[in-house]
Amino acid sequence: MSLVKLSEIVMEFEIGSFFKKSRLRAVDRVSIDIERGEVYGLVGESGSGKSTLGRVSLRLYRPTSGSVIFNGIDITNVPERHLRKLRRRMQLIPQDPYSSVNPFYTIEEALVEPLLTHNSIDRKEAVEEAKKILEEVGLVPAEEYLSRRPQQLSGGQLQRVAIARAMILKPDYIVADEPTSNLDASIRASIVKLISDFQKRLNQALLFISHDIALVSLLAQRIGVMYLGQLVEEGNSRNIVKDPLHPYTKALLSAIPLAEELKIEKVVLKGEIGDPSNPPKGCRLHPRCPYAMQLCKNKEPPVISIENRKIKCWLYTEK
């Protein structure tokens, strides 16, 4: 049984002014499931809806429609006060570490708070746990960091604190939302390894969100590719990297440095990602796709199964 199961998720937001409002569909009928101990990679450009889907999976957003199942329990419409018992089992590692820790808290207060909220331990025990987790994330000696505030740490150090805060409760499910995108290249690998080490040791389900498909392919057993709110391809990581099917997946892989060595068919998309508040009719990629046919412009392709993966493209369906 999947630990996390999202079925036909639709997530809409109201946008615009008081006098003229409209609905933006950030996620459009997406279904994924993640097993305990599995790393699932979610990739796509900014604006594809992947971060929104991650937050829906944690029930930080209540979906407009569809269902969120956690460990066999439907939590789609559970009130927040009843979700608190589950919060210790599902945690977020955010993209921006500076927004994840209260700037008025010391690092000790930031780490101790979730323990006192969710675990039946006293403050002394909580502080000892905080010291231990700081050492595990490489912030040593721990005593020197406990009294500091977020603005006294570098971005890399603060991201380690964010990871410590997420992992201190030993959750079953982690959403890592582009956890290295705001960091220097020199420390990205160490942050990814840190998250991976925790995931393996705690046998967690991990949803790793990134625009970097090469990085995701090194971590994840399965990859989902999102474009303008929809899942356009999903499958085993090795298969997707060796033999991408959807033109959008091919374009993402064409941009990586090893594309020629992997002998990936080079696909260059036209222009920029479309407006999610006004997506194109038919296939959402068709205005940018070099393979677009008239059918692509008029009719949305269905999701079909090919070679143990799912794909949403007219090139692989019977017209």
Image (spheres, grey):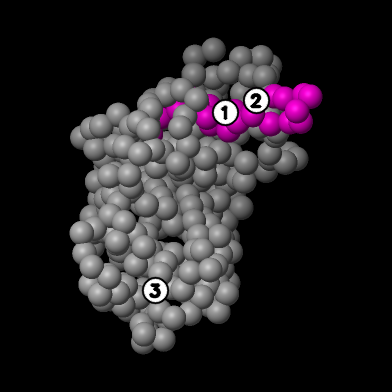
Crowd around label 2: few <14 · some 14–19 · many ≥20 (10 Å): some
Residue 133 in the image: state x and y as whole percent: 31, 72
The residue type indicated by label 2 comes to Arg
* Nearer-N-terminus badge (1/2): 1
Residue 8 in the image: state x and y as whole percent: 43, 24
Say if mark 1 contacts mark 3, CB within 8 Å: no
- In the image, 50 versus 312, the foreground residue is 50
* Nearer-N-terminus badge (2/3): 2
How many numbered marks are there? 3
* Residue matched to label 3: 108
Crowd around label 1: few <14 · some 14–19 · many ≥20 (10 Å): some
Looking at the rendered structure, the secondary structure element under dot 3 is helix
Q: Residue at x 24, y 37 (%)?
A: 71
Give the quarter of the figure containing the C terminus. Answer: top right
Crowd around label 3: few <14 · some 14–19 · many ≥20 (10 Å): many
Q: CA distance from mark 1 to mark 2?
A: 6 Å
* Nearer-N-terminus badge (1/3): 1
Q: Residue at x 48, y 52 (%)?
A: 177
Looking at the rendered structure, the secondary structure element under dot 1 is strand
Looking at the rendered structure, the secondary structure element under dot 2 is strand
Residue 12 numbered mark, or none: 1
Residue 24 lies in magenta, yes or no?
yes
Q: Nearer the viewer, mark 2 or mark 3?
A: 3
Query: Quadrant location of residue 182?
Result: bottom right
Residue 23 numbered mark, or none: 2
Say if mark 1 contacts mark 2, CB within 8 Å: yes
Magenta segment, principal secondary structure?
Answer: strand
Residue 40 lies in magenta, yes or no?
no
Q: CA distance from mark 1 to mark 3?
A: 37 Å
